[in-house]
Amino acid sequence: QVQLVESGGGLVQAGGSLRLSCAASGSIFSINVMGWYRQAPGKQRELVAIITSGGSTNYADSVKGRFTISRENAKNTVYLQMNSLKPEDTAVYYCNLYTSKVVPEAYWGQGTQVTVSS
């Protein structure tokens, strides 16, 4: 079983920065994709950024140039550095781990609230 624990959310003014962290524990196949998704009230969950165990990244257009995803494979930890935050970035941010050693498996964290005030 895999568990994901997020930290780092909070309240920040527009233009400010936050750094989210997500630590994975349990039986984790070394080849995987970790990432961040977010869900604002009344909206569907959407991709923010993902990073493979090899270091390849992908970002939503809305966060390109402002957010940076990184990871430490030895610690099974993924980070999301969020700069130049906007009110529309307000959402619950969820950490995700995807792997497919035998069958596809996806795990989610409990979510952390990010609120950006104008």
Image (spheres, rainbow, N blue to C red):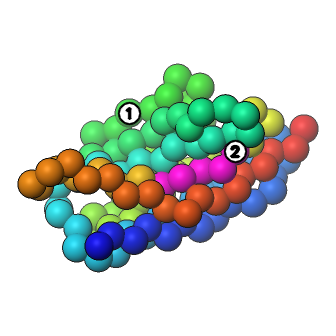
Q: Main secondary structure of the magenta part?
A: strand
Res. 116 image quadrant = top right
Residue 38 lies in quadrant: top right
In the rendered image, the vertical position of residue 57 relative to residue 110, given as above or below: above
Magenta-highlighted residues: 91-95
Quick check: marks 2 and 1 in contact, CB under 8 Å?
A: no
* Residue at point 69%, 44% (across, down): 91
Q: Amino acid at mark 2?
A: Ala
Residue 91 got which mark?
Answer: 2
Residue occupied by mark 1? 58
Number of numbered discs overlaid on the protein picture:
2
Q: Is residue 94 magenta?
A: yes
Q: Residue furthest bottom?
A: 26
Circle 1 residues within 10 Å: few <14, some 14–19, many ≥20: some
Foreground pick, 63 / 24:
24
Point 34% across, 38% down: residue? 57
Q: Camera-side residue: 76 or 93?
A: 93
Q: Is residue 100 visible?
A: yes
- Quarter containing the N terminus: bottom left
